[in-house]
Image (tube, rainbow, N blue to C red):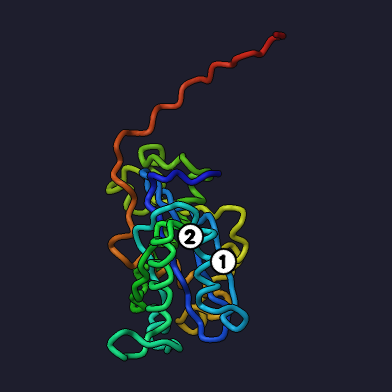
């Protein structure tokens, strides 16, 4: 599946000092369908920040990202370089600096990572709602709310024209593993499989994580015309 450029695009980084960074690439369609279409799991022990950003840019393609979120821990990680005013740069500063430089070089559309809100469970609940709706509608592009009136498993159906759903595409093996094994332990999310789930929470807590404006309603599917069914 090719993700259309006109959708809204987002990235997250679940930052760890020595453990692999979990980086995800997410898009929202005009019909409020969330697609996680690419991932990058990369070690800061064997890669510099520049190398990590370079590989992230390679996977980002020519998409322009509306929102980039990163774990606040990255704000406390000191860089080996200093700013012009003499203060020490952080890992976040380095990431944003390299993205700006790559954009100047015409390599990508840039981006700017800001630290995420880590408090509360609002993001977690939104993800669960999307996963629940995906189980109900079964396939992408099938989420018009009016088709599911009377289904007691759908939450807030009267407020939704299109049910928010979430789909994980084939390249994202670690994302699927994280979501599949996401568990609560003593009232807190398990840390073992939390990496990409935490990153997704970062996005879902931000008010800017929203679908693009719907320019036209989804066309009613009509019976397909079968061309060249006979011999030519």
Image quadrant holding the N terminus, namely top right
Q: Is residue 215 above or below residue 43?
A: above
Q: Who comes first in sequence, dot 2 or dot 1?
A: 2
Whole-number angstrom distance, CA of label 2 to CA of label 1: 9 Å
The foreground one among 42 and 34 is: 42
* Quadrant of the snapshot with the C terminus: top right
Q: Badge 2 is on which residue?
A: 25
Q: Secondary structure at mark 2?
A: strand
Where is residue 149 shown, x and y percent of the image?
A: 37, 41
Q: Is residue 2 above or below residue 125?
A: above
Is any part of residue 163 visible from this angle? Answer: no
Helix, strand or loop under label 1: strand
| Proximity of marks 2 and 1: CB atoms separated by less than 8 Å | yes
* Disc 1 packing (10 Å; few <14; some 14–19; many ≥20): many
Residue topped by disc 1: 40
186 sits left or right of 42 in the view: left
Number of residue marks: 2
Q: Quadrant of residue 193?
A: bottom right
At horizontal 49% and vertical 58% (from top left) the residue drawn is: 60
């Amino acid at each position: 599946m090719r993700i259309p450029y006109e959708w809204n695009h987002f990235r997250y980084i679940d930052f760890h000092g020595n453990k692999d960074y979990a980086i995800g690439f997410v898009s929202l369609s005009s019909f409020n369908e969330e697609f996680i279409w690419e991932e990058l799991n990369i070690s800061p022990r064997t890669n510099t920040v520049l190398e990590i950003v370079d590989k992230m840019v390679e996977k980002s393609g020519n998409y322009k990202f509306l929102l980039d979120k990163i774990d606040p821990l990255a704000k406390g990680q000191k860089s080996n370089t200093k700013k012009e005013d003499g203060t020490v740069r952080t890992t976040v500063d380095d990431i944003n600096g390299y993205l700006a430089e790559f954009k100047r070089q015409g390599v990508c559309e840039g981006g700017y990572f800001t630290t995420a809100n880590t408090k509360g469970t609002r993001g977690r609940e939104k993800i669960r709602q999307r996963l629940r709706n995906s189980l109900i509608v079964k396939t992408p592009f099938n989420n018009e709310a009016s088709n599911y009136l009377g289904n007691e498993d759908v939450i807030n159906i009267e407020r939704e024209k299109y049910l928010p759903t979430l789909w994980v595409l084939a390249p994202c093996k670690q994302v699927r593993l994280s979501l599949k094994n996401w568990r609560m332990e003593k009232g807190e999310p398990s840390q073992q499989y939390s990496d990409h789930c935490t990153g997704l929470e970062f996005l879902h807590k931000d008010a800017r994580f929203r679908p693009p404006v719907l320019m036209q309603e989804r066309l009613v599917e009509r019976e397909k015309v079968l061309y060249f069914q006979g011999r030519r």
